[in-house]
Image (tube, rainbow, N blue to C red):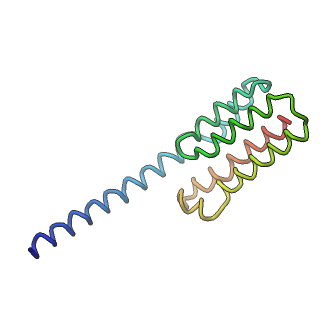
Amino acid sequence: MTESIEEIKKVIHDQYLRNEKNWDVDIRRMTRKFHPMLLEDILHSRSRKNHVGLLITLSLFKNDFPWIYDLGKELIEVLKSKKTKSIKSIAVQEFKEILEFTFGHPMMREMYGNRKDSLIYFKEIPIVLFNYLERSV
């Protein structure tokens, strides 16, 4: 019985190490998925009127940050609507706040890694999106 318990402990420990290693690989894969300059090119090269560039950019967040994707799609609908400029500005500001939380909150940064390239990634992406949104209202 003691041997069985030790074997189970070893299996659990091995599984833990394997999962920890895979989690680190997933974080690296996520942060290297695309460069912020690619986002800027996509945003600038597509029609502003229908916000295709923003939709393409949002799709890059769909798996890792689904709340950004969902709120971004809602923002596009508001920007495309005939609502007042004031209402559109409020919607943009609310979306910016979500971006700031996601990419700026210390708990979120810890969740997605503290490596230098991750920190640069989290600083540049909101700036690129903020610049686009400022010109969209």
The relative height of residue 13 versus residue 80 in the rendered view (above or below) is below
Residue at the extreme bottom:
2
Residue sitting nearer the eye, 65 or 41: 65
Q: Quadrant of the C terminus?
A: top right
Q: Indicate the position of residue 82 as horizontal and vertical percent values.
A: 86, 28
Q: Residue at x 90, y 37 (%)?
A: 85
Q: Indicate the position of residue 36 as horizontal and vertical percent values.
A: 65, 42
Q: Indicate the position of residue 89 as horizontal and vertical percent values.
A: 86, 42
Task: Say left or right for 44 vs 117.
Answer: right
Task: Say left or right for 81 vs 59.
Answer: right
Residue sitting nearer the eye, 1 or 13: 1
Q: Residue at x 58, y 58 (%)?
A: 116
Residue sitting nearer the eye, 58 or 121: 58
Q: Quadrant of the N terminus?
A: bottom left
Q: Residue at x 84, y 36 (%)?
A: 135
Q: Indicate the position of residue 4 as horizontal and vertical percent values.
A: 11, 69
- The image quarter containing residue 58 is top right
Q: Residue at x 79, y 41 (%)?
A: 131
The relative height of residue 37 versus residue 4 in the rendered view (above or below) is above
Task: Say left or right for 88 vs 8.
Answer: right
- The image quarter containing residue 103 is bottom right
Instruction: Count the numbered circles shown.
Output: 0
